[in-house]
Image (cartoon, helix red, strand yellow):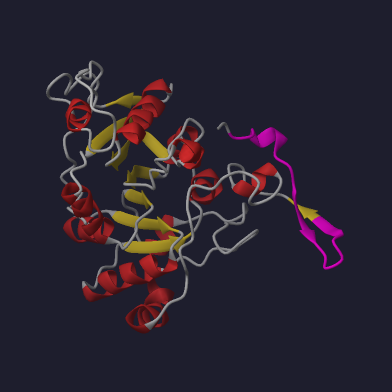
Amino acid sequence: MSESPASTTPESSDTGTDGSTEFPRPVTPGSQAAHGTYRVQPVSFVRRGTRLQGRRQKAWEDHSEDYVIDVPRQVSDTSVHPDYLFDAEAVYGRTAPLVVEIGSGLGEAIVNAAEANPEKNFLAVEVYKPGLAQTLLKVASRELTNVRVVQANAPEVLSTMLPAGSVSEVWVFFPDPWHKTKHNKRRMVKDAFAPLVSRVLAEGGLWRLATDWSGYAEQMRAVGTDSDVFANVHDGERTGSESPLTEARTSGADCEVSDEPDAIGGWAPRFDGRILTSFENKAHKAGRTIFDLTFRRL
């Protein structure tokens, strides 16, 4: 589903207790609010609870001041005010390549990468507060200084929060596949998402993706391939019997069994910087195939 262009973005309104509109306010291009109301368009995530308890609550109390980006809100607790601009040099206290992970989950991948690459800065973007609290636990226990986290809706982070051309890599690993056909429209990685990623990436920057659902993998490949600002780093590679898509079709783990080989390919080898997370391990146990893609910003 295509996004509304910024030039026609409507204003969001606060509504009084009597149902009257109190005042209009501008909204972030690419956000749910850009469609008139925050929930008019389907969102790409489900809030499964935000309450913190035990160690996670203590982690938030002890470490949020050091690691959590406190952004001004506009529509909800995951929105980002369009006037807010992230200043990486001020936040990290240095100038360094910035890696952004969209949907960082429990922080396994980004914390491991930050520890292995101290010369880079890392920003974890997640709507699930308990996941961010778990990330804080990992960051604090390893005494890392190159990681920050933000609870925010990804399209708004990419639309206005991050300066254009300020990011060296964007990671989207195992986003919610919304595998039922009627829910496919909720998927994050679609045609309207590519321009947001390209906006924040520096020239030559990389967009890395991974999924364990073949249908979503094909959609991701098409989104990157059809974009005029991205090039598939592994275009034409791993076709036929070497393709993970052929493997998925043969096994029928998440799609109908088929003997039709994948003639397009373009799949990346496993990214060395992506560790085996608990989530991916569950996919392996379920017999699903893992797909990696890497696109370069032209």
Could you say which quadrant of the image residue 126 lies in? bottom left
Name the one closer to the observer, 249 or 77: 249
Where residue 72 sits: x, y (%)?
A: 59, 63
Could you say which quadrant of the image residue 150 lies in? bottom left
Q: Vertically, is 56 above or below 177? A: below
Could you say which quadrant of the image residue 268 lies in? top left
Q: Vertically, is 12 above or below 16? A: above
Q: Which residues are magenta?
A: 3-23
Residue 212 is at least partly visible in this image: yes
Where residue 20 sits: x, y (%)?
A: 87, 59
> In the image, 16: left or right of 253?
right
Q: Quadrant of the C terminus?
A: top left
Where residue 174 sits: x, y (%)?
A: 32, 47
Name the one closer to the observer, 69 or 276: 276
Residue under the image location 35 percent in, 56 percent down:
104
Residue under the image location 19 percent in, 25 percent down:
246
Where residue 286 sits: x, y (%)?
A: 20, 48
